[in-house]
Amino acid sequence: MEKASLGSLPDELLLDIVEHLDTARDVAHLGALTKRTQSLVQRDGWCTFVKTHFSSLNIPAVSHTKWDNVANRATYLDRCWDKRAIVFSTLYENKKISKGSRATVPRGQSVSFRAVVDAGISPNHDDEVLAVGAGEDLIIRLRPQSGSHADKWHKLEGKTHGYRPGTGDVTAVAITEHEGMPRVVAGRANGDVQILSAEDDFAQSLQNLSLTDQDQQNLASDPMRKSPGQLAVSWVEWEPQSNLLASSKGSLLALHDLSVSSDDDGILTPTSHYDFSQGATAVADGEPSLVRGVKFMSKDVVACALGGSKEPLRWGRLLPTGPEFFNAVKRPHVIEVAAQIQESVRTTVRAIEPVRGGGTESLLLSAWDDGTYRLMDLRTPSSHDALYRDKFQPTEAGSSLLVYGTERFITSTHHSRVPVLHFYDFRWPKSYYHSAAIPCADEDPSPNPGPLSWDYPRPEYQPRGPSPAQCDAQSGSLCRFHDLARTTYFRPDASISIGNTSYDHVYNLAKASDLSDSFYCSLRGGIMEASWRLNHHRDSIGPSAPAGWRAGRAQDKIIMFETGTCLCRPSDWNSVGRGNSHMPVAMESIERGAHISRNPHQRIDETFWY
């Protein structure tokens, strides 16, 4: 009779054990017991671990997915986030030097272009696709995820297609796909929308889109519709299930079915459209609202962010007869003093992003002009279900959003003269802590983030096991370090300022996927790539650049402020609503390049200090 052992348990019990393991190291140890457990862990164990601890992240499951690699990437990125292990690189166009001593802006403009950026994964999941609108030019990069070969760059020069700087600038980009090939949609300042494909190396437009029909063209004769801001394409967004493309300019939203062929002139007309200037509220205001962002919540539900509107956040159903929109904020006075949107005052929602955690299609995060970030469920009548606000700059509006499931999100400040990024934790219950893989110790995580506020006092360790220096599995007690490392106090939110006024503020943010080790910031005259790298991997970054451009590590003064917990309680918010601008805040200024010890229990990785 075979002796009973852990390795002899049925597969379903072993997978139940995997669900309760805290670290990837423990899963690897379980797989090393026998050949059978090794096969089980490789086949199902790593997938179980990822779906247990990172269930809210959008991880596409394809036939060739290597779940051990996914687990390695997810745990690595979680550690980088908590330890602020981030490296910044810049990509800028080479400046032309005039005969005199002064450098001129490329292409002779007095003000450099404002870049726009989007990123995605190729249909075969082999490459990361990056699209950058650089003035009238469109630049596209294909980067192999395996790192097996160098980046491949493509450049569509606007002047060769009749576009001039300014009026022909690319103002919106989106990554799509068709028949296994990546495509890029580019909207321009003159209202043109083009689709380009990797089939011909993005050399020319395969399809041109019209955003208006004849009725809309007649309406466009209104002088209010002829300003540059109303003519420019402000947003393009693709929905893969229905193959719908949403485009906006001014107050107009147009929907195109990309499965339909173009007409004889090569123009694809919209299947439906909606004009936000024609609603009852807009007509009473006498001024059309600007569509600032469009996001598909599902294949038949869309959300829109508007500027200068009394109803700046709308959601709509896509019906056979056309889209039908509703005000997403039905009860604006949920918190007594705070977050009040006076019905006689226009305001702006500057960015929106769906939150896909747990498979839901109704959670939406929005950045408002009053400096708040509001998480709301479209199924409820509330104006928000959770509210976040930076405690250092509480009234600064955000210009863009990046969401990583229900784990965390990144924002950028709109009115800042330099790039400022905010790193927020949603503060939803976590099942994975990278600190669980660090050795036990009878000491606090360091450095101390400082006093937060009277609502979030410094936690005191209460020993429940035999020793504060060692975790005890039988009693479930944690050592001092592991107990405190999981607390909100030692996992504060943070802001990072990059001190270079030539960049201006961050215009928009983009990432290829929730598991990407980089995200991108569009700036004045170029872009910045932020890469998650621990110190021993930081030298692995070798930024490349297309012809006529330069890339390199950012050499600017970078400062991090730890801002405590930015998930607001009513007491936090009401103090601001009553005119009290001095909120209790934990703001420890940490400058890159400062000295830090190599203690394994250090909260901040060495990457930030060099």
Image (cartoon, rainbow, N blue to C red):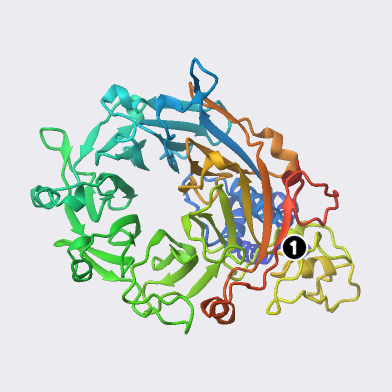
Which element is circle 1 on? helix
Quadrant for the C terminus, please. top right
Q: Which image quadrant for residue 328?
A: bottom left
Residue 230: x and y in percent read 25, 49
Q: Which image quadrant for residue 192?
A: top left
Q: Nearer the viewer, residue 218 or 363?
A: 218
Q: Residue at 27%, 52% (x, y): give it.
A: 242
Q: Is residue 40 visible?
A: no
Quadrant for the N terminus, please. bottom right
Neighbor class of circle 1 (other Cα within 10 Å; few <14, some 14-19, many 20+) is: few
Residue 482: x and y in percent read 79, 66
Check the image and report above or below for 92 versus 40.
Answer: above
The answer to whether 3 appears left or right of 108 in the picture is right
Residue 16: x and y in percent read 63, 67
The answer to whether 436 appears left or right of 278 in the picture is right
Q: Nearer the viewer, residue 323 or 432?
A: 323
Q: Residue at 73%, 65% (x, y): give it.
A: 490
Check the image and report above or below for 539 versus 235.
Answer: above
Toward the front, the furthest residue is 100
For label 1, the residue is 6
Residue 309: x and y in percent read 31, 65
Check the image and report above or below for 86 versus 310.
Answer: above
